[in-house]
Image: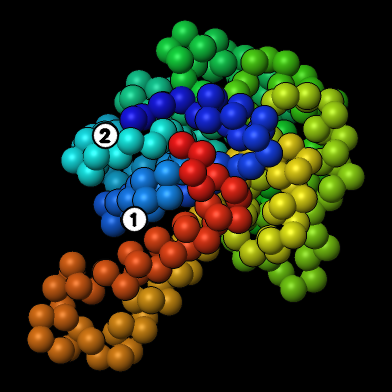
């Protein structure tokens, strides 16, 4: 079922676990994530960046693919289709195309403008029963050409945005997108704790889930994180498995060039990564 992420994240917050957002890039990615969620009886959020949206031929193509797959594969666990780091225009386009959830990333605007734009989108999403994620304090690293420095969110600004009625809130706590550098000092749990106190029951979102040590993930969940975004880790797993297949010359054996065979090891690697994350986040059996 394609559903809003609101209820699954409220349940996660109450149950002290987190739901994974796994970004999709194509049919194989989507199928691997949906099948793993169903096997593990876990709720799941499919993330789509604006860049991936263009790559997959637009938001209506994606809605068609995901809805079709849920139906044809007999997926029964709750699935949210979510725009990741959306612009104001991108959020509106995804709402029109039939996404069940959007993120409006207004973290680069002055706080007043972030509030005004978030407020308008919250009203639209409320009317349609969709969930909406907002962001305070930009997340470090690079995503679709946007480079953030990894600042920490101001807990008072988090409270202002949370009070607008968003469904979940992404707050920078020293996390970054992509691979973490060797000298990364770790998550700022002091900031997370302060934000958690200010926003109460609001589910918090941790972006840049790739490479954060398991103990830090668990501590973040204990402090109120209910949604964790994973993107780079699936890409690295897929690339490594595909590289191995080619380097072992498997594509030259028999019909090893068949894309269904060529991409199979990568798909298996995505499934294994998603399973590992769902187990770590505690969402297995929570659907
Ligand atoms: Zn992000």
154 lies left or right of 69: right
Which dot marks residue 121?
none
Q: Are marks 2 and 1 in contact (CB under 8 Å)?
A: no
Q: Is residue 79 above or below residue 120?
A: below
Q: Residue at x 54, y 10 (%)?
A: 123
- Quadrant of the snapshot with the N terminus: top left
> Residue 231, percent across and down?
51, 55
Q: CA distance from mark 2 to mark 1?
A: 15 Å
132 lies left or right of 92: right
Instruction: Place residue 46 in its image quadrant.
Output: top left
Q: Residue at x 80, y 32 (%)?
A: 196
121 lies left or right of 25: right
Q: Residue at x 68, y 15 (%)?
A: 164
Q: Residue at x 65, y 35 (%)?
A: 15
Judged from this view, the residue extending furthest toward the left is 254
Identify the residue under disc 2: 67
- Residue 147 visible in this rendered orientation of the protein: no
- Residue in front for this viewpoint, 171 or 149: 171
Q: Secondary structure at mark 1?
A: helix
> Residue 95, percent across and down?
40, 23
Identify the residue under disc 1: 32
> Residue 139, percent across and down?
68, 47
């Amino acid at each position: 079922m394609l559903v809003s992420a609101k209820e699954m994240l409220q349940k996660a917050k109450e149950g002290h676990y987190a739901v994974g957002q796994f970004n999709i890039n194509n049919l194989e990615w989507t199928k691997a994530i949906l099948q793993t969620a169903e096997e593990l009886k876990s709720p799941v959020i499919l993330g789509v960046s604006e860049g991936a949206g263009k790559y997959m031929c637009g938001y209506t193509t994606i809605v068609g693919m995901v809805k079709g797959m849920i139906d044809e594969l007999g997926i029964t666990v709750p699935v949210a289709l979510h725009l990741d780091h959306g612009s104001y225009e991108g959020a509106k386009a995804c709402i029109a195309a039939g996404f069940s959830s959007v993120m409006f990333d207004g973290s680069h605007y002055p706080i007043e403008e972030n509030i005004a734009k978030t407020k308008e989108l919250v009203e639209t999403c409320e009317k349609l029963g969709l969930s909406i994620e907002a962001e305070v304090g930009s997340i470090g690293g690079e995503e679709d050409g946007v480079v953030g420095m990894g600042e920490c969110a101001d807990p008072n600004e988090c409270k202002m945005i949370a009070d607008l009625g968003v469904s979940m809130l992404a707050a920078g706590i020293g996390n970054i997108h992509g691979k973490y550098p060797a000298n990364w000092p770790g998550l700022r749990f002091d900031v997370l704790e302060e934000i958690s106190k200010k926003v109460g029951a609001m589910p918090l979102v941790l972006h840049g889930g790739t490479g954060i040590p398991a103990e830090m993930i668990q501590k973040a969940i204990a402090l109120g994180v209910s949604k964790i975004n994973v993107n780079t880790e699936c890409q690295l797993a897929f690339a490594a498995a595909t590289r191995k297949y080619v380097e072992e010359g498997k594509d030259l054996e028999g019909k090893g060039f068949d894309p269904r065979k060529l991409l199979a090891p990568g798909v298996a690697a995505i499934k294994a990564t998603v399973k590992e994350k769902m187990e770590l986040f505690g969402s297995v059996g929570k659907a």
